[in-house]
Image (tube, rainbow, N blue to C red):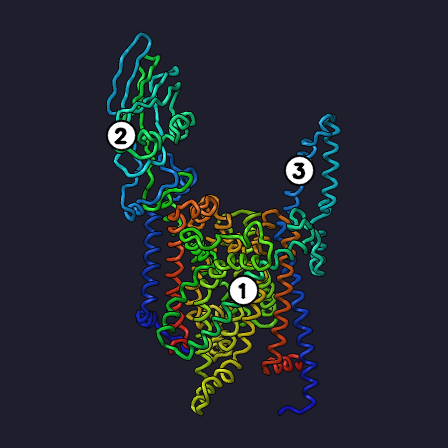
Amino acid sequence: MSLGIGRRGTWAELRRYPSALAGVALILLLVALALHTLATVPYGQAVASWRSGEAHLPVNARPVWSDWLSPGRAPRSERLSAETRESEAFPGGRRLTQRIELDYTYDDFPSELALFLRPQHSERAAFLRLGWQTPDGREITLGSRRLVGETRVALSQDRALEQRLGRPAHFGLLAGPDGEALVPGRYTLTLEAVFFDPAAELESELWLYGRVHGLAGTDHQRRDLSLALRWGTPIALAFGLVAAVGTTLSTLVIAAVGVWYRGWVDALIQRLTEVNMILPLLPILVMVGTLYSTSIWLMLGVVVLLGIFSAGIKTYRAMLLPIREAPYIEAARAYGASHLRIVMRYMLPRILPVLIPTFVTLIPTFVFLEASLAVLGLGDPVLPTWGKVLNDAQAQSALYNGYYYWVLAPAALLMLSGLGFAMLGFALDRVFNPRLRNL
Amino acid sequence: MMPRRSWGRDLRYLALYLLKRALALLVTVLIGVYLTIVVANMGGQVDDLRRVQIRSEAFEQVRADPAFQEMASAERNALVERRVALEVERLRLDEPFILRSVDYLQRAMRLDLGRAEQMHSDAGSRQVRAIIVERLPATLLLFGTANLLVFFSAVGSALWLSRRYGSGVDRLVIALAPSSAAPGWFYGIFLILAFAFLVPLLPPGGMVTAPPPDSRLEYAASLARHMLLPVAAMFLSSIFVSIYAWRTFFLIHASEDYVEMARAKGLPSRLIERRYILRPTLSPIITNFLLMLIGLWSGAIILEQVFNWPGLGSLLFQAIGFRDTPVIIGGVVIFAYLLAVTVLLLDLLYALLDPRVRILGEGRSGT
């Protein structure tokens, strides 16, 4: 075997393969995305906002770019505060009147309407009446309520209002008299509050939840999918890389040790490999995930552990057997090199180049393994990953409900990382594998 | 030519070699199955979980039963205790785990799969054998179809491509090979999206329509429609890399000196292919084929989940969810036996096909 290709030689060879260049470009892109994510979104923040979702985000909003594809302006999220405020004092309290104006120009109904109220300097319960004025001059009363402390008035979930309008509030309030077509124009929300505290104040905001949000949209728990997609990148790369390094290197070292010491060491390693071949990897991972913990690092550990005595040992052993008898090894023994030195410094480096392509092609396998586990519901409990996004989408029947973006974005990222490493790996295989070089 | 009496000696060595291998494989299966038993029971910790579950279930049953409403609480507690004790005894949780694990092991090795603890077959049987047998046809049908399709079309087109090495089609296959980095279920998601939702031609999952058609022909047609997408997903995810691998394999063998020699002699290419390329490469092809066949056994957990296919993969997944140890062990032990038998078969085949193995056996037993 002639494996003496220098590093520069490898690169020159690789440049001949356009697929290798494309693969390298894809990998660099993913690494850049991963580094950027790590630098801009701290771990704690990512975990916290992924766990709880964010109140100001709409539910199941499409990504903004999907709006550019379809002609039309899908509603964005907006927060509107009162523009006119009037107050009128009376003995023992004050009456506040506020108007929130909404210029509605979008082509579609919003996904939700909610009112945020924050009374200040008011100890006792206040009385609040809400009114809605449409551009065509109709008045709709939104009912009255007691107001104590900070309140979120979920107009879209108001069943009584829905009964009166015939549709949920975010449709009914913005539709024409027939209750069907959307009427663009200026809407006014009037709040009349009676406080029994002379110094009372009221902060009010009307929250319009859009149909589109951000680069990746949101999921059913008001979570920004771009967070999971971005944080999934370093996790996927780390998982793939560590698992590939861990399994290939440990397998190689063990194979070399077996070949060098022969006898019972070799026999033991061979038998362990055979036992390991009988154990099915995925069911064992599922068992560990179900019974112990779904932590991604535990899974990684089990993958590496089961990968140590993988079938690769047999291949490496076949490659190492002739090397063992090579004259340079004999020379090393003659000058008194230790066993460990011979294994690590003389035998391993000889077959390392053959290993590199295998190693690169293995990375996507592990990236997809992580996704597979997550799709089975055994994703890491805290970390947002691509697989967990897919799992959520699957659980919420995203395809059936038409939330294609929810499946497509994580799938595209998985596919890109798979393609990147596989294209590079296949090209490397042709460069490093002397038997393939002329083919 | 060997002398005549060496045939008997060969046969003796072969038998000895096979016996040794069979023993080694048996020990391997033994260790593998025992490890699975330990993992599936969390080294005995599952017992504690199960005891808690038994207690809460027994309590719930007694509480919900109107017949026991009037009972005094002490009496009722005693009843719960009695029921718990009965159930614990039924599941033999009162014995130490080490003892039971050995018992599990020896029963598993005798293929006495026993009764499931939580699950039952759709027909209502609690026998692990019945549960597995019920799921087996679904898995074999789906994965058998897909894998045989992939195997034969890959080997066939690889042979064809190795003759047209460097052509446009060849380059296309090489360029498409990295697409196999994604597993079948991944393509499955897209196929479901495309052919079940965007263009609703095919069902998104399941095995037959509900209710299942009565006539045999309609049943088969419905089955075929449901199989189309999962088979396509598996085919897509592995066909290009298989063609690539086999093509490279054949090309390497086609550049051996004796093949060049045959070509130089002017032998027809069909003959070269059959006698000079396929025959020496027969053992790796058979190995691959047999390993693929046992690969069918475990099914693919995720593909079956994605397509809602009632096969062994999803059975194993459910069993793990229920912590139903007998079912898990049943699945693994059959897999282990199948693998061991296949490896033994391969050893025998190699010994017959490849004279070097015979010589190796001779050398070993000679020293």
Question: A79 or A304: nearer the eye?
Answer: A79
Work out whether disc 1 and disc 3 sit on a shared chain: yes
SS for callout 1: helix
The label on residue B145 is 1
Coordinates of residue B134 in the picture (x, y in percent): 64, 56
SS for callout 3: helix
SS for callout 2: strand
Coordinates of residue A243 in the picture (x, y in percent): 46, 58
Number of numbered labels in the structure image: 3
Mark in front: 2 vs 3: 2
Question: B155 or A245: nearer the eye?
Answer: B155
Image: B23 above or below A382? below
Task: State which chain disc 1 sits on.
Answer: B
Please give left or right for residue A184 compared with residue B146 in the image.
left
Q: Residues within 10 Å of mark 2 (few under 14, many from 20)?
A: many
Q: Are marks 2 and 1 in contact (CB under 8 Å)?
A: no
Task: State which chain disc 3 sits on.
Answer: B
Q: How far apart, in angstroms, are the residues tagged by discs 2 and 1?
A: 60 Å
Q: What residue does disc 3 label?
A: B57
Res. A406 visible in picture: yes
Q: What residue does disc 2 label?
A: A102
Mark in front: 1 vs 3: 1
